[in-house]
Every structure is written in structure tokens, then in C-alpha cells.
Image (cartoon, grey):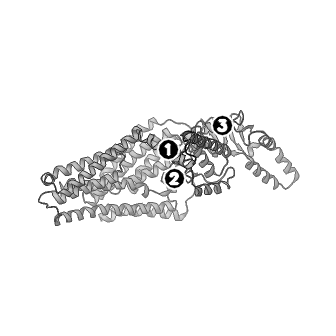
Amino acid sequence: MLLSTMIGSRAALLALVINSSSAFAPSSFVPKTPLSSTTQTSSIVNKAQYQQYSKQNTQLADYGGPTDYSSLDLAGECLLTPEGYGFSSSAERIIEGANRGENAGYFRAKATDRVIDVMEAITQGENDVALVYDGTDLAGIFTEADYINFSQARAKSSTEEESAQYLISSVKEYVTPASILVSVSTDDTASQALVAMRESNVRHVVVADKVSNYRLVAESEIIGVIRMQDVMTQIQKDERLSLDSLQQKFPGLKDPLSQMREEIKSQANELAREPETSKRDLIRAATAILSLLTVGGFLSGSPWLHAHAEIAMIGIFLLGYIFIIFEEVFEFDKAAVALLMSTGMWVTYADYYGEANGVASDLVVTQLSEQLAEVSDICFFLLAASTIVEVVDAHQGFKVVTNLITTKSKKGLFWIIGFLTFFLSAILNNLTVTIVMVSLLKKLVPVEADRKLFGAMVVVAANAGGVWTPIGDVTTTMLWMNDQLSTYPTVTELFIPSFVCLVGSLAFLVNQVEEDNSLENSTLPDPSPLALRGQVVFWSGIASLLAVPVFAEF
């Protein structure tokens, strides 16, 4: 029975490692919340937020600036406007509401058109931006900001002849290229469009039927162009309509705040009647009752617990693992469940098992100290390893890895990512490497369906790579620290089986990869030389991690 209790302790540790592994991963690789999560946004922004947002928007210009879309978060429950309106209005609805001509917000220009002709069209027409086409292909966008760049270049002309030459220049030479256009899909929301404009420092975004990572892809069909004024106009209309609706719904209340409070109560009641909310409330009530009964049983010193302590510990273990396995259904945190499970088993073992009389004996205290010491060994090792990974990332040491990825073949990339994951997992811990590689795939592979297949491959490769070294996986690390295995036999006897598993799995999965030119839309920066300091830090970090089992062995 002590063995079951020890398993519970290790389960708690494993759950903690899984839940905290994202904190251990290199910060530059940690996935951030995608814009698609802001499908519903609040129509009510407090004064401080509004002032900050207004101050930031005064700095907007056209193309250029940062591209991290996660720093401005407008997400929240929609209190005044229903879903699909206000901040959650779709880009397609904003285009329809703007009603700005046949081309939906842009002037269509040819690549051979002169700059002065295109500028005349967007200053005197109903649209203030031009999309420039080279035949049927989009060459880029031309705005007043691009015209300013054109004028600055012309002003630097050394002769009148050179200056005159600028007047007949084709607009294609001065557009912002299509490859870096900030784009949203027709289903993206107003809040997503605002965040994209804010973080990219632009006032126009292109709307297309298909986009990836807020960039156009080869099969994108342009629907139109929306500007910040279009978005804010639509939001203002919807919120004004919502206020009018509240006045009609609650005519007895004259204060808009009182009307809003009543609406919130009404929405809360509607939400409580939904099946998903009812399920959540039922689970919480059942959990509270079960917790109270369990605590009451422990405190009462029930004779049944003394007589059936083994059954009680087995029941706690099975119940805990059921909650861990069905985490998504019960919406519990697996780390919390594992800790409670382990605590319950230790309390039962200490107070009720065998000759226990409600007070932990010296033997139990010694056993608990030994178990905590083992768990602490692993935690300290993982903390040290994660610190090394963070230091390497802070010096951009992972460029040593990313600079190796230059292929535009999807099948070639599949094999490269697989082998990199396999060998890095053996050194850096498979959980950390999985997070790093999956984050990297978001930049490398723009098509979501392909990313899922690549992600499955990363999980397989990471698990195969983590098996053949003592420090590649939490399980092997625990066994190694408990002297259940040694370094040399583990590496020599398990490397070939692990490698065969990797190659066999990749050979099977790669047949599902379909070659196309989608990797050309990758957002991974081009390879660049790594400073000597970064190289020293990277290889020193790898050497430090490899030295752990070597020193322990000899």
C-alpha cells in the first residue's frame, strides 16, 4: 500500500510539471493568446483604458511597426451589444455597413499606373487607398503614407531631370508589398481588426476570405479594405442602438446604469439556464458535497476507515485519476486534483492504516520525508534545466537551431523538425521541447491543417527522444534518481529502438503531407548570424545539461 501512496506523490509531481512547463519554456517561444480568442468583446471600457487606447491611437500611421497582436486585449463579455454586433461585428459586416463603392473600400490600380494618377484617384474618389495589381496578382497597397515616402525620395533628387523622372514612375515601385499586408478574414471581429491596426501601426487592413497569421495566403480572395473609421463607426452605431433598446426594454428606469444592471441580471439568468452552465453548476455542487463528506469522514475518526484503510486509499487513487483523465469534462485543474489525491492518501495511510491511532508515527514521518526528498530532487533539477533554457533563449541561442530551417519543402521540413525534436528532447526535456517546437510551427507552417499534422509528429518525436537519456523525460528522470537505471546502459540500449520508432513514425506520417507553396507565407525571420556570445551560451548550456548524468555516473 505504501507503493500506491508513492505513486500518488509522483502523479502530483507529474501534473505539476505538465501544468508549469509553459513557464519553463523559452519566453520567445511561449504561445500567446491568438486574436481568434477575442470573438466577443466588451462594449464598456473604463475611463483609464479608454484614455490609454485613445493616446495610443494618436500615433497611428500607415504600414510599419510592431506585429505582436496580443498586447491589446479587448476581450470580455458583451454587456450592451449582442454577439455579432459592436466589437464582435464581423469584418464582412463592417464592409457592408461602410458602403464605400463597388470595390468595397479601395481603388483598383494597375502596376504600370503612374504614382500621380493613383494619388489623384484616392484623394478625389470615395476610397482613400489603392490596391495595386500586377496582372491578376496583388502587388501591394498604396496609401498617402506611401506617397509621402515617394515625395521624400523625389525631394532628394539632385537634378530637375531626375525629379521629373519621378513624376512618370510606376506606382508598383512605391507600394507596400502584399507579403506584409496586415489582413483579416471576413469572420474576424471588429476588436481583432482594431488590435491588428494598433499593433501594426496602420489605419487600413485588407479583408480576404482566407488569411493565415494575419497575412494573405496564395489562395486568398480580396473582399475589400476597411479603415479604422469604418470599424469605429459600426461599433458606435451598434452601441447607440443597444442603448435605445435598453430604454425600450426598461421604460420605468431612466438611468442608463440602472437599465444596464437589469440587463446584466437578465443575461445572467439566461446564462444559468444553458445546458453547459447547468452542467458546470452540478459538477461544482457535487464536488463541494464530496469534499465535505471526505473531510467530515477524516475528522470523525470513523471506525470504517480504520478497518478498511486500504480500500479507502485505492478509492481515493482511482477517483483522483478519473478526475485527471476527464479533466476537460469536469473542468478541474489536474495539478490540484493530483495534490489533493496525494494528500488524501497520505492522511489515510498515516492516521488509519495498520496500527495507526490518528497520529502519524515516526515511521510514517520518515517515509514522507524520503518521498518529499525524491520529489524535491526532480523539481530542483527541472528548475535548473529550465533556467539554462531561459538563459540560452535570452541570448538568442536557439538561432543555432532555427538557422538550420531553410527548406520550403513541407516534407523536407517535416523530417527536419522531427529529427531536431528527437535530439533536443534527449537533452532539454521532452515537455519543454514540445512547447518550443509547437510554438515554432505557428510561425513556420501557416496552414492550420498542416500544423495539426506537424504537431502530432512533434509529440511522437519528443516522446521517442526523451526515452533514451535519463534527463529527457520526467519518468526516466525519476527512475534514474531512484537508482533504478543508470546512464550508460540507458543510452546505449535504448537509442536504436527510440530512433527506429522515430523513423518509422515519420515515414508513416510524411505520406499525409501534401506539397504546395504555403511555406512561402511563413512568418519565421530569415536566418541571420548568431553573435559569438550567443553561440557560447548555447553550447555551454547544452554541455551543462549533458554533464548532469555524466557526473552522477562517474
Residue nearest the observer in this picture, 290 or 100: 290
Q: CA distance from mark 2 to mark 1?
A: 12 Å
Location of mark 2 (residue): 402
Location of mark 3 (residue): 97
Q: Is residue 97 left or right of residue 34?
A: right
Q: Position of residue 271 (x, y in %)?
A: 44, 41
Element marked by disc 1: helix
Q: CA distance from mark 3 to mark 2?
A: 44 Å
Q: Is residue 364 left or right of residue 517?
A: left
Q: Position of residue 437 (x, y in %)?
A: 46, 50
Mark 1 or 3: the one toward you: 3
Q: Residue at x 35, y 57 (%)?
A: 471
Amino acid type of disc 2? Thr
Spot the residue most to the front.
252
Q: Quadrant of residue 245?
A: top right
On the question of residue 256 being in view, the answer is: yes
Q: Name above or below for residue 375 compared with residue 467.
A: below
Q: Residue at x 27, y 62 (%)?
A: 374
Amino acid type of disc 1? Leu
For marks 2 and 1 on the same chain, the one whose residue lies earlier in the sequence: 2
